[in-house]
Amino acid sequence: MKISVALCTYNGEKYIAEQLESILKQEKSVYEIIICDDGSTDDTLRIITHYENQFPEIIKVYQNSENLGYIGNFEKAMSLCTGDLICLCDQDDRWFTNKTAAIAEIFEKHPHIDIVCHNIKLFGEAIDPSEPITYWDLDSTHPNTLTQPQDIIKRILYQGNIFPGMSMAIRNTF
C-alpha cells in the first residue's frame, strides 16, 4: 500500500524541518510527500526546497501562484497525491515513527473503511511539557464515549469536529 502525504505550508519555518524529518523516519516509508506552499513570506520555501533537493524521488514542492487558503490548499495537495492512501499533514505536526504503519495496517485489515482518524498529542509553547495533553483532552472527548456511529455524528453536528485534518488518512479512491 503506497502512502502519500498531503502537506500544506504557509509561513511555517518554525516546525517544518522537524515535521519533514518525522515523516521521513517512518517505520513504513511514505511513497511521496506533496507539499503545497500557499505564498509563504518567511523561510518556509527555502527549507522545503532544500528537502526536495535532498529527496527528489519522494518530495515534490508546489508553490501556489495565489493564496488559496487553508481548504483550497489542501484540496490542491490531495488532488496531486497518487498513493493508495493520503495522510493529511499540517506544517507544524510531529509524527510518531509508527504512524504510517499503524494506519496502513487498519486499511489493509478493513478494505471497506475509507477514512481513519486518530487522536494526537499536542506540543508547542502553549502546552506545558510536564503535562502530556492530547487533542481529545481539550474538550474531554474520548472514544469510549462515542460507541455508536450516531454518537459521532451527533457530537460533530452539535459540538464541532473532533477529527482535525492532521489526524486523518483517506483512501485515495474515496
Image (cartoon, grey):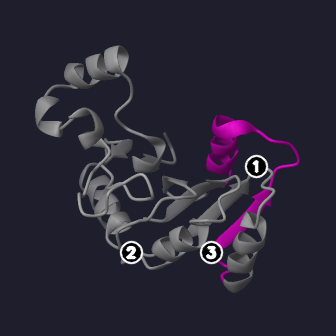
User: Label 2 neighbourhood size at 10 Å, few (<14), some (14-19), many (20+)?
Assistant: some
Could you say where residue 43 lies in the image, as x and y percent from the top left? 76, 67
- Pointer 1 or 3: first along the chain: 1
Q: Which amino acid does label 3 sit on?
A: Ile
Mark closer to the observer (1, 3): 1
Q: Image height check: is 120 above or below 4?
A: above
- Name the residue: 69% across, 43% down: 73
The residue to which callout 1 is attached is 38
Q: Which amino acid does label 2 sit on?
A: Lys
Q: Image height check: is 116 above or below 128?
A: above
Residue ranking furthest to the bottom: 54
- Name the residue: 65% across, 39% down: 70
The residue to which callout 2 is attached is 28
User: Can residue 168 be seen?
Assistant: no
Could you say where residue 160 lies in the image, as x and y percent from the top left? 38, 23
The residue to which callout 3 is attached is 58
Q: Nearer the viewer, residue 131 or 54?
A: 131
The image quarter containing residue 156 is: top left
- Pointer 2 or 3: first along the chain: 2
Q: Is mark 1 on a helix, strand or loop?
A: loop
Q: Nearer the viewer, residue 169 or 163?
A: 163
Tell me where the magenta segment starts and ends, as one range: 55-81
Q: What element carries label 2?
A: loop
Q: Which amino acid does label 1 sit on?
A: Asp
Quadrant location, the N terminus: bottom left
Could you say where residue 12 lies in the image, as x and y percent from the top left? 65, 59
Q: Is residue 58 magenta-colored? A: yes
- Pointer 1 or 2: first along the chain: 2
Could you give the CA–CA distance between mark 1 and mark 3, rounded to whole angstroms? 20 Å
Q: Is residue 61 magenta-colored? A: yes
